[in-house]
Amino acid sequence: MGESNQQIDKKLNRTGKVQRDTNETSISVGLELDNFNAGEISSGVSFLDHMLEQIAKHGQIKLDVQCKGDNHIDDHHSVEDIGICFGQALNKALGDKKGIVRFASCYAPLDEALSRTVIDISGRPCLALHSQWTAAQIGDFDVQLVREFFQGVTNGASMTLHIDCLRGINCHHQVESVFKSFALALRQATNLTNQTSVPSTKGVL
């Protein structure tokens, strides 16, 4: 069954852009949920760039990120604030959330590592992230910042997010499998159905 004109029009307009300026960071994040072209990502944190590329590629979204942060202190502010901006841009792109799938769960392996993400675009920010990272650093990237990024995403997007890194030996593999599982689940949860109502008994999300 083909998609209605309403759904097609809705897809074409599922975009969100956020500009956030503080004493710690200046960030611009734009995303297009139904545009599979590559965007430009420059977070000022090389490993985070690599992870954001995973979200864009496997989430099948166009993602543009520009950040100037106080990296001379550390990367915490940049990573956390990019997560917040990503979540806010996503929330804008989803609009009234009519017709979205809403719930999704996906696994993603990377060699010996395996992660699972479960998403509910619920209107309620909640993060449950469980992992046993095998290293504290990946290059100069502090692995604790993975949690800060996803906490920012959940707060910005008002979504419920359960992430489990189930196993792994190489910490790079562990973290990358987390981001890939998130990207896959995000794609599924934001897909449009043939319904035109909000997927909630409350009538709003």
Image (cartoon, rainbow, N blue to C red):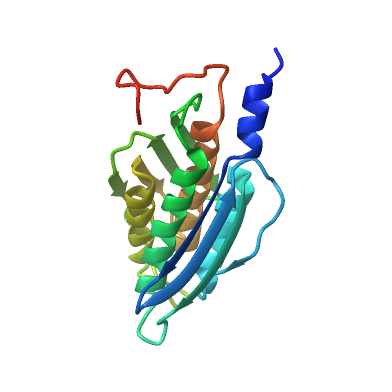
Q: Position of residue 53 (x, y in %)?
A: 60, 58
Residue 18 vertical placement versus 93 (above, below):
below
Q: Is residue 166 left or right of residue 170?
A: left
The quarter of the displayed image where residue 202 is located: top left
Evaluate whether residue 133 shows in this view.
Answer: no
Evaluate whether residue 180 shows in this view.
Answer: yes
Which residue lies at the image location 56% right of the left edge and 31% below the top edge?
Answer: 191
Judge by depth and name the residue closer to the eye, 97 or 187. Answer: 97
Q: Position of residue 56 (x, y in %)?
A: 60, 51
Q: Which quarter shows the C terminus?
A: top left
Residue 120 vertical placement versus 152 (above, below):
above
The quarter of the displayed image where residue 137 is located: bottom left
Residue 161 vertical placement versus 100 (above, below):
below
Which residue lies at the image location 69% right of the left edge and 22% below the top edge?
Answer: 5
The quarter of the displayed image where residue 34 is located: top right
Q: Position of residue 126 (x, y in %)?
A: 27, 43
Judge by depth and name the residue closer to the eye, 91 or 104. Answer: 91
Outermost residue to the top: 1
Q: Is residue 77 left or right of residue 175?
A: left
Which residue lies at the image location 45% right of the left edge and 33% below the top edge?
Answer: 96
Q: Which quarter shows the N terminus?
A: top right
